Image (spheres, rainbow, N blue to C red):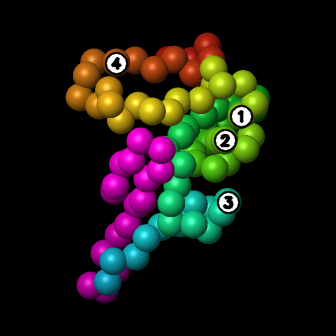
Amino acid sequence: IDLGKSTSVVSVLDGGKLVSIPDPSTKSPLVPSVVGINKRGELLVGQRALDQVADPTFLVRESKRMMGENHVFEIGEVQ
């Protein structure tokens, strides 16, 4: 996993070969580093989160700089 501030890449070793897992909605190996919850309460990751979550209070982004800290993210009304 390569966690970037704006995009991330997830890869696995498959038969000795490195294979990137694409964002399901775009088929790109670069996945926006965003998670969110839509109006139905579904957890969304990557481009789907950016496309389907209209209210920015329901998105978490730019969290890499807080890794290792005791930080609680609030997404809308959810912790």
**What percent of the width, then of the height, locates residue 25?**
67, 60
Mark sitting earlier along the chain (4/3)? 3
Q: Which residue is mark 3?
A: 25
Bin the neighbour count of mark 1 within 10 Å (Cα to Cα): few under 14, some 14-19, many 20 and up.
some
* Residue drawn at the location 35% of the way across and 70% of the way down: 12
* Residue drawn at the location 34% of the way across and 18% of the way down: 71
Q: Secondary structure at mark 1?
A: loop
Q: Which residue is mark 1?
A: 53
Q: Nearer the viewer, residue 3 or 19?
A: 3
Bin the neighbour count of mark 4 within 10 Å (Cα to Cα): few under 14, some 14-19, many 20 and up.
few
Callouts 1 and 4 close, C-beta under 8 Å: no
Q: Is residue 26 magenta?
A: no
User: For the residues marked 4 and 2, what is the alpha-carbon distance in whole angstroms?
Assistant: 22 Å
Q: Which residue is mark 2?
A: 50
Mark sitting earlier along the chain (4/2)? 2
Residue 1's place in the image compared with 74, above or below, is below
**What percent of the width, then of the height, locates residue 32?**
54, 49
Q: Which residue is mark 4?
A: 71
Mark sitting earlier along the chain (3/1)? 3
Q: Amino acid at mark 1?
A: Val
Q: Secondary structure at mark 3?
A: loop
Q: Secondary structure at mark 2?
A: helix
